[in-house]
Image (cartoon, rainbow, N blue to C red):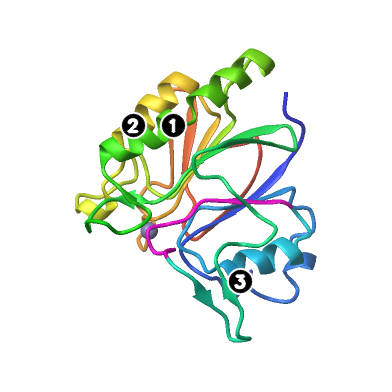
Amino acid sequence: MVGAMRIMAVSDRVLDHLYSPDVGQKYPAIDLLIGCGDLPFYYLEFLLSALDTTLVYVRGNHDAGPQYTAEGRVLMDAQGGVDLHGRVVRVKDLLIAGLEGSMRYRPEAPHMYTEWEMTRNAGRLLPQLLWYRQRYGRSLDILVTHSPPWRIHDAQDIAHTGFKIFLTFMRLFRPRYLLHGHVHIYRNELPRITRYHETTIINVYPWQMFDYGTL
Ligand SMILES: [Zn+2]
């Protein structure tokens, strides 16, 4: 069982109402901050510190290379956070795994994967997932991705096509949640939350806040 836990997830766009000095007063009890990619690292670091919480994240297809801040810092990752890509971590009693990036639409570009390459990434999680299942009776609580699954919240163009392996993954390992970004929603009629077998899939763009188990 996972105790009461409030999760804030962010992706793809810096929001003024979160990137603000009073964010800690507005949202005082965030137990876990989850980054779903395509965000500047300074934003994640700011939220981590202002919310005084724990950060896990994956990179999006636009997170390649160093990032330069106005103060002259060079950021290669979000300091103090855990880059989840290709691993399963146990954070505050939750088992969380990550698979970064998008469908490959440029050869050789980082953080882009063909369906086969993403299947290999997912395969690397297997030993840990099996070990956790042995140890805790469940493999995974949350899968954090940048891209959506195939035909769930995805789009027809190559860059925004979802991954089929995520469907297989959900059927096999039954995470309670899959959180993704990447698909920008500008019209409210598009679905943000979809159920697939035992998993609730949430399009985080540009942010979501919920109590674990209530969605
Ligand atoms: Zn993206």
CA separation, marks 3 and 1?
A: 33 Å
Is the C terminus in the top left, top right, bottom left or bottom right quadrant?
A: top right
Which of the marked residues, 2 or 3, is nearer the chain's N terminus? 3
Pinpoint residue 65: horizontal percent, then vertical percent: 44, 67
Q: In this rendering, is residue 70 above or below 100?
A: below
Pinpoint residue 55: horizontal percent, then vertical percent: 67, 53
Q: Between 66 and 193, which is closer to the camera in this rendering?
A: 66
Q: Residue at x 49, y 52 (%)?
A: 204
Residue at numbered disc 1: 195
Amino acid type at image mark 3: Tyr
Q: Between 101 and 149, which is closer to the camera in this rendering?
A: 101
Residue at numbered disc 3: 42
Amino acid type at image mark 1: Arg
Disc marking residue 107:
none
**Circle 2 residues within 10 Å: few <14, some 14–19, many ≥20:** some
Taking the image in four quarters, ligand 1 sits in the one at bottom left
**Circle 3 residues within 10 Å: few <14, some 14–19, many ≥20:** some
* Left or right: where 199 falls relative to 209: left
